[in-house]
Image (spheres, helix red, strand yellow):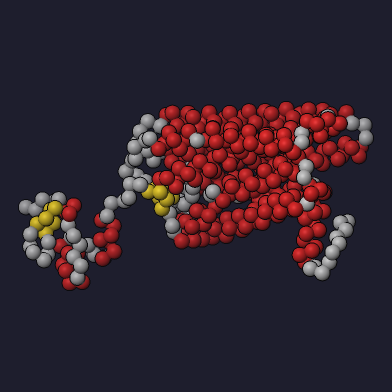
Amino acid sequence: YQHPSLIVDTRTGHRIPAAVAIVPKTERHLEHFLDDQHINHPMAVFNLTPADPSTFTLSGIPGLETAHIWISIPFSTFYTISLLGNCTVLFVVGTEQTLYKPMYQLLCMLALTDISMSTSVVPKALCIFWFNLKGITVGGCLTQMFFLHAASVMQSAVLVTMAFDRYVAICDPLRYATILNNARIAKLGLLGLIRAVLFILPMPLLLSRQPFCANHIIPHTYCDHIAVAKMFCGDITVNRLYGLVIALVVVVLDLMLIALSYGLIIRTVFRISSKKAHQKALNTCTAHICVMLMSYTPCLFSSLTHRFGQGIAPHIHIILANLYFLIPPMLNPIIYGVKTKELRDKVGKYTFRMCSPGATDFKPA
């Protein structure tokens, strides 16, 4: 009888504990060792090593592993367009003094949050798709979770401020410069950042105190709060409730403020007698409403389905969750570039200069 925790050392013939057994170094001894352990392939030796308890494994999109390389094509394309568009907005607004206005400051804040959101998720997802680099440390996972959720909350605060900006510009235009100036916009942006940090910081702190489970595989492309919480064996009721409350408070409260602002805007617009002013006001609000719908719809859907959507296929949920970090950051600069004439003209000027290095003047149509 051979105890299951003992193995035979092929060099000495002695039985030693498996926990302290040393794999033979020479090729001949290695063959004897594999024969004694009934291992058919030398690489299987490395699978005997227990998983590092300080790391998680992001599996990508469950059920679509064979299609990862194809899925990476739209991911990388959308991410590249997002970086190009948002960096263009930051560059043009930063170099044109005529755009040093509250509305364009808000566009820069939105561009920064878009870059932060997509960059906290997409590069790691592409590493999974392209190089099968699925490992992530617990600290790295919690850090990613903090930044992606904090950027989402910050984006919501920026959208609320933009709605308030449009309300003042349309409903009380004579006092616009007094109510909203660059310094006040900067303070509102700082307040939104503080709110995001205070709301999201408890999430990783609460999870960091929980014990690990044996299963370290996260069926996702990034470290979502609830997906990570399921990896811990302790009582995560507080984590679930806190995450749900934050999601509802941020989304519901901010949506109510946005709806109130645009409700007052629409009431004011319908009171305008001039058709030209009427059309200009509606045109200004259309871009904002499109951005609101693109940002909040997938965010709310992803948050609710992760908690209550057991009947939804995992790969459908994960793809939609990733689209939240891809589509809005890609389309936001495009929408504002098309709808905002002053920004569109400035972008056209710089594009014209790049395409025609000898040109010095650009006159938009």
Q: Between 3 and 123, which is closer to the camera in this rendering?
A: 123
Q: Residue furthest right?
A: 274
Residue 102 screen position, x and y as percent: 76, 40
Which residue shows up at 14% across the image and 50% down it? 5
Residue 253 in which image quadrant: top right
Residue 90: % across, % down: 70, 51
Residue 303, above or below 65: above
Q: Nearer the viewer, residue 167 or 213?
A: 167
Visible residue check, residue 323: no
Quadrant location of the C terminus in the rendered image = bottom right
- The image quarter containing residue 290 is top right
- In the orientation shown, which residue stands out farthest toward the front? 183
Q: Percent from the top left, x then y, of residue 36?
A: 15, 62
In screen coordinates, is 125 left or right of 363? left
Where is 2 relative to 317, above or below?
below
Compared with residue 119, is residue 196 higher up or lower down, i.e. above or below? Answer: above
Residue 236 position, x and y percent, is 40, 32
- Residue name at image x 32 percent, y 43 percent: 214
Asked if one can make out residue 140 in the rendered structure from this viewpoint, the answer is: yes
